[in-house]
Each structure stands twice: as C-alpha cells, then as structure tokens.
Image (cartoon, rainbow, N blue to C red):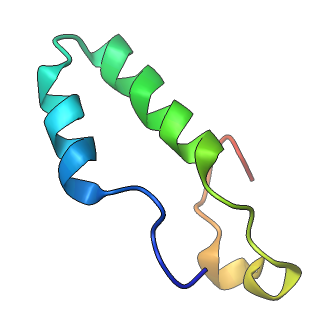
Amino acid sequence: MDTFPIEYSRVVEAFELLQDWDARYHFITELGEKLPLYSDDERVELYLVPECMST
C-alpha cells in the first residue's frame, strides 16, 4: 500500500464533529472497511496487532 486513500485533514475534521465515543468508533471502523486489503506479501507476523479483533 503506497498511499493512504483517505484525506487525513477530512478525517480529523469529521472526527472532531462527532460527540460520543460510539459514533467515533463507528466512524473509524467504517474508514477501515474502505481501505484496500493488504497483499499476501504484506500480511506478515511483524504487522499483526496482538489481540486485535481482525487478526
């Protein structure tokens, strides 16, 4: 993955408008679902987040 396909400043602006943590969590997870999948070469132990729900 060479570039982040979502404009950072827009993410910050939208995040600041959300008042509660449930809405913020939902917003972040929706952004994550829009990201391209990692290639098999990028799916290595080094990048795994321990105890992450998606691993």
Rendered-image quadrant of the N terminus: bottom right
Q: Nearer the viewer, residue 1 or 23?
A: 1
Q: Residue furthest right?
A: 40
Q: Nearer the viewer, residue 7 or 29?
A: 7
Residue at 82% across / 88% down in the picture?
41
Task: Find residue 49 and report its horizontal and vertical position in percent.
Answer: 58, 62
- On screen, 53 above or below 30? below
Q: Is residue 18 left or right of residue 52?
A: left
Task: Find residue 54 and report its horizontal and vertical position in percent.
Answer: 71, 46
Task: Find residue 30 and report its horizontal and vertical position in percent.
Answer: 54, 32
Q: Is residue 8 visible?
A: yes
Q: Is residue 40 left or right of residue 37?
A: right
Q: Nearer the viewer, residue 21 or 39?
A: 39
Q: Nearer the viewer, residue 11 or 28?
A: 11
Residue at 64% across / 83% down in the picture?
46
Residue 4 location, quadrant: bottom left
Q: How many marks?
A: 0
Residue at 28% across / 17% down in the picture?
21
Task: Find residue 52 and report its horizontal and vertical position in percent.
Answer: 61, 48
Residue at 23% across / 45% down in the picture?
10
